[in-house]
Each structure stands twice: as C-alpha cells, then as structure tokens.
Image (cartoon, helix red, strand yellow):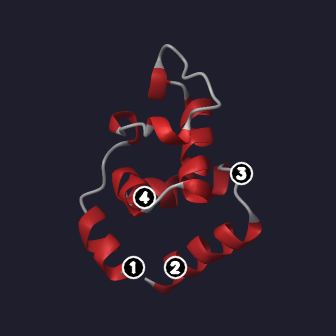
Amino acid sequence: MLKYLADEASCGKQAMNMKINPNLIWDYKVPSRGFQDEAFRRWYIGRVLARGGVKDIRALGLRTIRRYLPHVSVPARIRAFWEWYFEST
C-alpha cells in the first residue's frame, strides 16, 4: 500500500492547494486565510498524520509530508514511521 501511496502522490500538490477535510478540524476554527496561514498548515498536516486516513494522506502528497514532517507535532510512533518510510524510499 505504501508504494501505491508513493505512486499516487508522486506529482505532489503544493501545500497552498490542499483540500481541508472538515471531519479533521471539527474542534478548530479555520483562519479566514485558510492554508495561506503557515501555522494552520503545520497544525493541519500534523492532524492528518495523527488522525487522517489514506484519502487525507493522498490529498497532502508525500512531498508535502516530507517537507513539513520536521515542523509538525505528531506522536513519536507516527514520526518514527514517516522517518523510516522516507529513509527507505
């Protein structure tokens, strides 16, 4: 499945164009500027990595995850997985 994710996301969407899954932000007020706000982007990407599904990860794209991983707050086991994944590919 990870290979499939890599193939699907190889074109990678820019962070500014990411779709927001409203089911992941039920407890957070989206800034009026949406993804133009860097703090919100970091928060949302961390939320996707911690609580999102395959569709959410595909929507982010692997390039975006790789770029933001050092800057997002996620549980250690999730960070370890993604670090392992990017070192393995």
Q: Using the numbered discs, state the Cα–Cα distance from disc 3 to disc 2 in whole angstroms.
A: 18 Å
Does label 1 or label 4 sit earlier along the sequence?
A: 1
| Above or below, 26 relative to 48 | above
Residue at the (47%, 23%) spot, across then down: 34
Q: Earlier in the sequence, mark 2 or mark 1?
A: 1
Say if 67 sits above or below 26 in the image. below
Quarter of the figure with residue 75 = bottom right
Q: What's the amino acid at mark 2?
A: Tyr
Q: Point out residue 69 in the picture as x, y percentages from the top left corner.
A: 59, 57
Residue at 65 percent across and 57 percent down: it is 70
- 78 left or right of 6 in image: right
Quarter of the rendering occupied by the C terminus: bottom left
Location of mark 2 (residue): 85
- According to the picture, the residue beneath numbered tag 4 turns out to be 57
| Residue carrying label 1 | 2
Query: Separation of disc 3 and disc 4 at Cα?
Result: 16 Å
Q: Secondary structure at mark 3?
A: loop
Residue at image mark 3: 73
**In the rendered structure, which amino acid carries the disc numbered 3?**
Ser
Q: Mark 3 or 2 closer to N-term?
A: 3
Q: Which of labels 2 and 4 is toward the front? A: 4
